[in-house]
Amino acid sequence: MLHLLVFSVFGLVCVAGAVNLLVQRHPINSALSLVVVMGSLAVEYLLLGAEFVAAVQVIVYAGAIMVLFVFVIMLLNAGEEDRTKGSRVAMLFGIPGVVIGSVLVAWVLVGHSGTGNVAVGALPGPPKVIGWLLFHDFLLPFEVTSVLVLIAIMGAVVLASHPGSVQQTSAQADKREG
Amino acid sequence: MAILLTAVAYTVWLERKVVGHIQNRWGPTRVGPFGLLQPLADGVKFIFKEDLIPPHVFKPLYIAAPMIALIFALTSISVIPIGNWITVFGIHTPLEITDVNIGLLIVLGITSLGVYGVALAGWSSNSKYSLLGGLRASAQMVSYEISLGLSLVGVLILAGSFSLRDIVDAQGGTFWGFIPRWNIFQGQIVAFFIYLMAAYAETNRVPFDLPEAETELVAGYHTEYSAMKFAMFFMAEYANMITVACLATLLFLGGWHGPHRFGPPFVQAILPVFWFVVKVFAFLFLYIWVRGTLPRFRYDQLMAFGWKFLLPLAIANLVITALIVALRA
Amino acid sequence: MVPLSYYLVLSGILFACGVTGFLIKRNIITIFMSIELMLNGVNLSFVAFAAQWHALSGQVFVFFVMVVAAAESAVGLAIIIAVYRTRETLNVDRVNLLKL
Amino acid sequence: MTPNLHLWLIPVLPLVGAAINGLFGKRFSRQTVVAIALGFCGAAFVMALWIAFQFSSLGLPHIELLASWIRAGDFQVDFAFYLDQLSLVMLLVVTGVGFLIHIYSVGYMWEEAGFYRFFAYLNLFMFFMLTLVLASNYLLMFIGWEGVGLASYLLIGFWFTKDSAASAGKKAFIVNRIGDFGFLIALFLMIKHFGSLNFVQVFRIVFRMPAEVAGTGLLTSIGLLLMVGAAGKSAQLPLYVWLPDAMEGPTPVSALIHAATMVTAGVYMVARSHVVFDRAPQALMVVAIVGTLTALFAATIGVCQTDIKKVLAYSTISQLGYMFMACGVAAYSAGIFHLMTHAFFKGLLFLAAGSVIHAVGGEQDMRRMGGLRHHIPWTFWTMTAATFAIAGFPPFAGFFSKDAILWKAFSSEYGSWVYWAIGVFTAFLTSFYMFRLWFLTFFGEYRGEAAGHGDEHIQVIDSRAGAPAPHEHGRGGIHESPTVMLVPLVILAVLSFCGGWVGSERFDKFLSPALHAEVTLSEEAAAATSAPDSKEQGNSETLFTSISVLAAVSGLFLAWLLYHRRPQLPQEIAHALGGFYEAVVHKYYVDEIYAAVFVKPLIDGSTRILWHGIDRDVIDATLDNGAEGAREVSDTMRHMQSGNLRSYAGWIAAGAAVVIAYMVWLGAR
């Protein structure tokens, strides 16, 4: 029963974080709520026995990507998000639509795939196997992703470091260079 | 926890003494014999100081930031095994708080989270200096984290497992009698140096302590913090230092493996711990020593060094060790 | 023992939140975050199925998703910076002119 | 072997003349142009005469191969010339009369602009006519046929600045084309069934075929189609409308084309392919009927025409009707004989009319003439000779040839008394309107204004739509034409006087080798006519000739009575006849009917159906609508590209939802 308990706790934390992301006005808050979501997800992975994934999740996602986000938010010093009046239609259709949709999906999932139960740590653990898989069965995708990352890096560098393409206020200049 | 905190305090003391001596001045001497009580005094001072919060600061994060930093710093210690199995009063416990078979990963994860503390602090204190400081610190930490991680991989390849305990066990025994089979001697010297530098950068220490460089950015991200919050940052920093030191000893200096066993069984049990402490102390001393002597890196030099030199070196090292392991196996 | 469907429901919810965020939010960065959220939701389902069928390949997929997410966010953020530099704003509605 | 007569020289000479005049005429002076034109035409005439002298020594159908033209499998057509009695006669007529008209038109067209152009066209016309006459196969004949049509178009429309002349030329050409269409189909049938177009092969095949007495077989259809071609070219009943309008052209043109040569082509073609017609009695009967009806019909219209040239035009049509009637009753030789004599006196009539018009300064309306016999005596006497000839008074040529036709119409195996009766009545009408013309122009007092001094000319000319009509040199009042015009008139008068003496029998014998040599049937007919009832045929023949002479005299008397004694009588008759008279005056409204029946619907049909209906509504519509549709679709799509990121996001989400739904549906299925 411990698993169920832990699962539901962190599940709720996840959902709360996600909702918070939506509700929050200031991006920094939503960023942090996202970090919380990722943390709880890491725990979920642990529950599912995928330690390595959890660790990587934490390191890569929470550690690197979210830092990037926070970094950018800080860099751009984005202000509060101005609350615009949501259009009637969106409200009217949006919310009920989402609710119905999720309920439907949930019902379908719970109803149909109630088969497998997941044992904790049932996964053939050691990351060595994952490493093996990574470099044998999935070598090609691995290489492709590495190329992708390379491109991404180059893209990021070119885009971000393009100095003075546009006349900018002095304040930004020093801030950006910091 | 208690041990760690006192250790932190006395590292501070040690540092001030050593830096003082380096600059041929005495360290703190007045409070207690050889200034031993100085850290206590500082602690008290911090506690009693007025804890003011500057206006239109992003309140929630402003307060949370130091906490985050400290929390992550302390949790990373939990995974580090200090000693070998000891049987104390019949309890056969491994000398570590928890034994997780992906210890190293967890440590890495937590150190990467540590960045948040610094970043948020810088940003939430709503001043240009702190913002810049925070930006620089986080940028630095993020970029060096990679090389840190890569340098550790070398060791992993040798040990073959994430669990710190296994890594240390792998370093037992000696080469031809007298050279201990520490990773540092198993071809990991280069990795050790990379680790060393990355560690300094991670903890914003000396050569890389640009963020809190007094001269330029007025103590960087924790300029606006005072008293207790500042203390937290301070402690977080030193805690990180200790963690890193422990890691170094575990991974490179063979953990609790001493040259040879002597003394009675009781002493025998304590001996690994003793060795471990000695190594950690040595590493810390190295820290402080470097702090006292090396000049500070300019920011772009720092970043360039991090990306253009350290990272390729780490990758090269990784490749070489992989080759060695593959060839030997 | 936690039935698989719970995980799927959770990932479904996460995904839904991601989508709504993607649609509602004004700030580009927040939109980016909701994308990350969606990806995480997907990751969860990946791992859940991997666990159920004891196939490690599920996890490997998660790595690939992460790599892609990382690359995507790197480039995206760079773009955001460029956009900010030229448009002075992050509000999506005002960023609709191709030419300045 | 028969000596090589270089037949090809005859048509080529006028062609060379036409080429020189046509290409370099602009730079030559008028004298040189005349010299070239007359020289080449004269040379052709001399060649024809030279061949005529040798003719007796020649083998019968003398064929000269010049060059091979089409060689497609077994079908072969080549440039070859065919000379026999029939083509010799035609040759002489064409070159002779043609040459005289050349001389005449020198005087007539002297002041005209485009002098060289006129003579170039004339020579061109001669070339085509000669090729037509000398051709040894139908295709070469067809070339001549078309060429003659072209030349007539060019000549009729000589004063192309006058739109009436231009449209007349167009009308002539189009109507001819319709006729040629029939002719062409006949050619195709021949190619299909006989495999060749050469006269020799075709006649040999047809000769062996049985006569199609009952039903319309191949030969009848070919015959009928040839008849259509001939009707188009020789202005027979259905397709005669172009001839009266062709009077727009200069008078020598009318003389040459509408009297002597072109119109006779049809008769020549029917005579030439007599073998076909002999085997197709129905076709022959049709020819006869068409001939007689045309004769009668044209004669009635001719009676109340006021324009001198129009009267002559209708008389030509009716005389041609006679010729076709002759051919229709298988009396080809009579037809050709009449053709020859007709060429003489009709050519003379036209030229005389030309000199009359020339004299009165371009005036063509008979009502404005009168009493010209003192002013232009030469023209008067030559005109009188021609009028008596055409009317059919005994000593003149017309009597002999017309009488022969009438006799053959009655006596011939195919003929019947109906043809004879109509023929006689038409003869009466012919002499009536000819003498009416004669009295109106030459007797009574002068009704025209030209009597005064020159200014009327100008006024007259202006009245005629100000076009640069042939401004006769208005020196002084009515004057005799220059000698260069009178000489041909005199020659033609002599010919039309003694042309008939050849006599139909001798002419018949002369032509028989060409026309009857292989024809068994017509031989019996000839034999029958000449042999058994020669005695009884003798007195019945004299009876018939006396009747026709009586018709001619009564025609003269009536004309004298109406137009000379009591000039006001015609008006009363006109009122009495009322509606009928109106109809006749307006040429039975044939032109209007044609316009309404054929031209208008064609034009309307093409505009409404082809142009509006298909072109605009169908083709353009599809394209425009296509483009419109594309534009609309793209327009709606454009709104999607609003730049609003969140709408993009919305679209993406919607798309994803659709895909997911599809997947689920797929899965669930």
Image (spheres, rainbow, N blue to C red):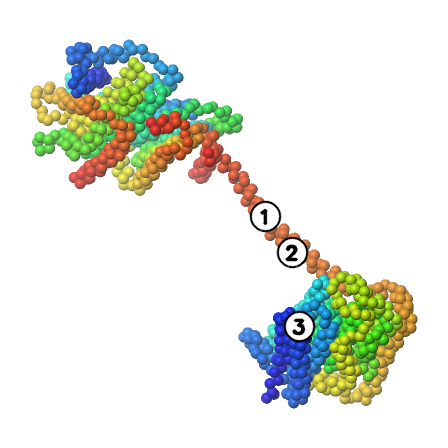
Q: Nearer the viewer, mark 2 or mark 3?
A: 3
Q: Quadrant of the C terminus of chain D?
A: top left
Q: Are marks 1 and 2 on the same chain?
A: yes
Q: CA distance from mark 2 to mark 3?
A: 50 Å
N-term-proximal mark, 2 vs 3: 3
Residue at numbered disc 2:
D610
The quadrant of the picture occupied by the N terminus of chain D is: bottom right
- Residue D173 in view of the camera: yes
Ranked by sequence position, the earlier of labels 3 and 1 is 3
Label ID, residue D29: 3
Q: Is residue D250 above or below residue B254?
A: below
Who comes first in sequence, dot 1 or dot 2? 2
Q: Mark 2 is on which residue type?
A: Leu
Judging depth in this view, the residue of D222 and A171 nearest the camera is A171
Q: Which residue is mark 1?
A: D624
Place of residue B288 in the rendered image (x, y in percent of width and height, measured from the top left): 19, 22
Residue lying at 66% horizontally and 85% vertically, measured from the top left:
D51
Q: Are marks 3 and 1 on the same chain?
A: yes
B18 in relation to D493, above or below: above
Q: Quadrant of residue C41?
A: top left
Q: Looking at the picture, how far across and down is residue D572, in whole percent?
A: 90, 66
Neighbours of disc 1 within 10 Å: few (<14), some (14-19), many (20+): few
